[in-house]
Amino acid sequence: MKRDNLDSFRPHPQLHMNHDTAVTRPAPAPGLVALFLGFLNLGFVSFGGALPHARRIVVEQRHWLTAAEFTDLLGLCQFLPGGNVINLSVAIGMRYQGLSGALAALLGLIAVPSFVVIALGVLYEHTQNDPHVKHLFAGLAAAAAGLLVAMALKILLPLRHNPAAATIAALGFIAIAIMRFPLLPTMLALTALSIAVAVRATR
């Protein structure tokens, strides 16, 4: 992902209240170590789907993005090839520390899952016919679905003040989840519609 494509997501001062002195101060931009550890934590806790945890860590805990910025950047990452959270980690790392930040965030994100997947793959090969294991994976799938629904509701919150964006999101849900239209043509059509709406709103 080119750094020029992230101009709209440049760092901005985030003010935090110091309750002892009642003075606001900007939150410092994360360094390479902070990016690595932040996404290492994300990779460590992201069982059942990473997106809900990504929003909680990036927006609510680390304050690297606002809720609106997260929604906008996630929309861009979903349109690009590759995994959403991987694209998100690269974009956030690039935003703060350039190419080095992108690599630090990406390595942090994939370190723990890579080890866990290899270990679980070896374990599953020997236990895949156990009925208890089958019930375990069924329960994990249900929990993952619940996490995705909760994340979707949180992502929709910033759109409540933007009827046009909310309408486009609803159209996307209807087209893909209900009408079963192909993903790529639907996203291309909705992207063109979003651009047209944004251009008209600026006039």
Image (spheres, rainbow, N blue to C red):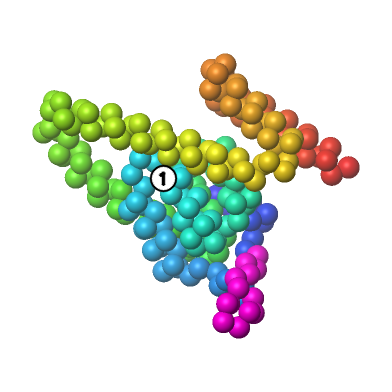
Looking at the image, residue 70 lies above or below residue 82: below
Q: Residue at x 32, y 53 (%)?
A: 44
Q: Is 102 colored magenta in this rendering? A: no
Residue at 22%, 28% in the rendered image: 135
Say left or right for 181 vs 128. right
**x then y, percent, for residue 66:** 60, 56
Residue at point 84% right, 44% down?
202
Report whether 155 appears left or right of 38.
right
Q: Residue furthest bottom?
A: 21
Closer-to-camera residue (20/184): 20
The residue drawn where x is 30% and y is 35% is 140
Instruction: Give the labeled residue for mark 1.
Output: 50
Which span of residues is magenta-colored?
12-24
Residue type at mark 1: give it.
Answer: Ala
Q: Is residue 176 visible?
A: yes
Disc 1 is placed on an element classified as loop
Dot 1 alpha-carbon crowd within 10 angstroms: few under 14, some 14 to 19, many 20 or more: many
Q: Is residue 4 visible?
A: no
Quadrant (top left/top right/bottom left/bottom right) for the C terminus: top right
The outermost residue toward the top is: 179
**Image position, residue 199 (x, y; %):** 81, 39
Measuring from the top left, give residue 24's x and y in whole percent.
64, 76
Name which quarter of the figure residue 129 lies in. Answer: top left
Residue 200, x across and y down, in percent: 84, 37
Which of the 4 image quarters holds residue 172?
top right
Which residue extends farthest left?
126
Q: Quadrant of residue 134?
A: top left
Please state which of residues 125 and 104 is positioned toward the viewer in this rendering: 125
